Amino acid sequence: MLDRIEWAVGQVQSIVQARPGAQELVCLVGNDLVPALAYTDLVGELVIGDQVWLNQRALSLNLGTGGQALVVAPFTDHSDLAAAADTGSAANHSTQPAPTNPCTTANHSVHPTPVDTAITANHSTQPAPPATPSDLARGTNPASGTDPASNTDSGYLVKARYTPLQVAVRGVDSPHSPHHQIMQQADSLEGMPVVTADLHSSLPAICAGALASNPTLRVAYVMLDAAALPAAYSRTIHQLRQAEMLTAVITAGQAYGGDYEAVSVHSALLAARHVVQADLAVVAQGPGNLGSHTPWGFSGLAVGEAINAIALLQGKPIGCLRVSGADPRPRHYGLSHHSMTSYGKVALAPADLVLPILTGQLAELGGPIRTAVLELTKPKGRHNLVKVSTDGLLAVLGGLSQQGIGLSTMGRSLADDPAAFLAAAAAGRHAAALASGGVADTANNRD
């Protein structure tokens, strides 16, 4: 659960320290002097007298490390804009356009407009009183005015930490969470199958493949922080929730905005099993996979690390292969080098690697993919090669559009690159079989 950013307007009173890329400041907010940090690569060099937008939530939470307001942007009010229009130069050294709803700072006080008031509802623009020893002893949060003895929804984690738009969230594994006792005791996934996928675009196909096999399954999505951080950025998540294909979204690490917020992928997985009571989970980064055309420089490596976490927690890791019959880049055609590296080098624990049985016009593509996957099973026992039929899955995937769920990977649709989505749906089908009490026929699937 997100806590809204606490906005304020401050005036730079002094520059305490400057280093490459950052300035440590003292700013006047209302009648209070507050410490602040500006990232000069983002907001430019500031001088005494400049007015700035501040995100001061961490300061109000009385954090130790990071207990500073953060400069979001130089502030320009309407009079500054008028002066800039008359003189042809921006007043107060600001190069930023005026905010849509600027505050005024007459008499050094902060007066939010109605829109600003809505943004900061129930959150004062003044720093919270410092925590006393007795406050800290019983875990009171002075910023929220709540005490865990009377309100179990207090207590915060900070994500997108130390960035100007860092956010405070109520964590599922926070000491103040109503789920804290469960999370404190949880240390096993109890064999829950977990599908890992390189690309966010695989998520709807995995869910579709699983639910086509067993519509009663509770499916949780663990969103990693390797790509987009806000879960709200994903149209796919919204569409899957609208279609009731996802039971819960858990944002792990620095990612935020899920139904539950977790510190790590490990605690996110445990929350999926013991808080959400999911039957299976899908682990993938959010939208925006980052690659560099180098062997190790891509964000999808996180799925190999997720395999290790799943195995450590006694879950059943299932690797969704990234395949394509339409990608013009040789490194991603057939079986992507992302899968070869993530599962072949980063994943130290064994997983079921799901090989989709491609038929018809895609049969020719299946041979090279199978040959590449076999390399991932060497030495014997490292990974299990599990061949899964794709019969009927194309129709299942085609039906997603009727539920308002789009399929697109690297700008290609289901019609453009059916193999990519069939591989993901096959992984979901295999996970559903395990979650429903089935046993993978590994003896017949090994080559």
Image: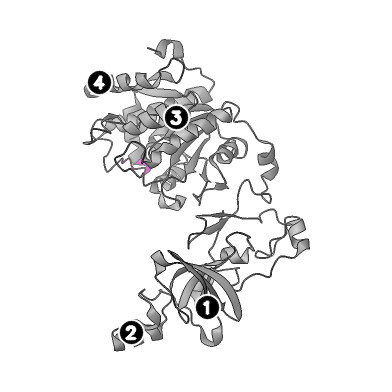
Mark 3 is on which residue type? Ala
Residue 447 in the figure: left or right of residue 214? left
For residue 23, above or below residue 350: below
Measure how far apart labels 3 and 2 are at the Cα level.
59 Å
- The residue identified by callout 1 is 14
**Which of the two marks, 3 or 2, is nearer to us in this view?**
2
| Lateral position of residue 223 relative to residue 1, left or right | left
Q: Nearer the viewer, residue 324 or 350?
A: 350
- Residue behind mark 3: 210
Q: Nearer the viewer, residue 351 or 361?
A: 351
Residue, disc 2: 84
Residue 264 in percent (x, y) is at 55, 43
Q: Amino acid at mark 4?
A: Ala
Residue 33 visible in the picture: yes
The residue indicated by pointer 4 is 363
Q: Could you tell which of marks 3 and 2 lies nearer the N-terminus?
A: 2
Rounded to the nearest angstrom, the CA distance separating label 2 from label 4 is: 66 Å
The residues colored magenta run: 402-408
Work out which residue is located at the far right of the displayed protein and give it: 134
Kind of residue at badge 2: Ala
Is residue 155 a member of the stretch shown in magenta?
no
Q: Give the structural element (helix, strand or loop) at label 3.
A: helix
User: Residue at coordinates 34% horizontally, 81% vertically from top-left?
Assistant: 90
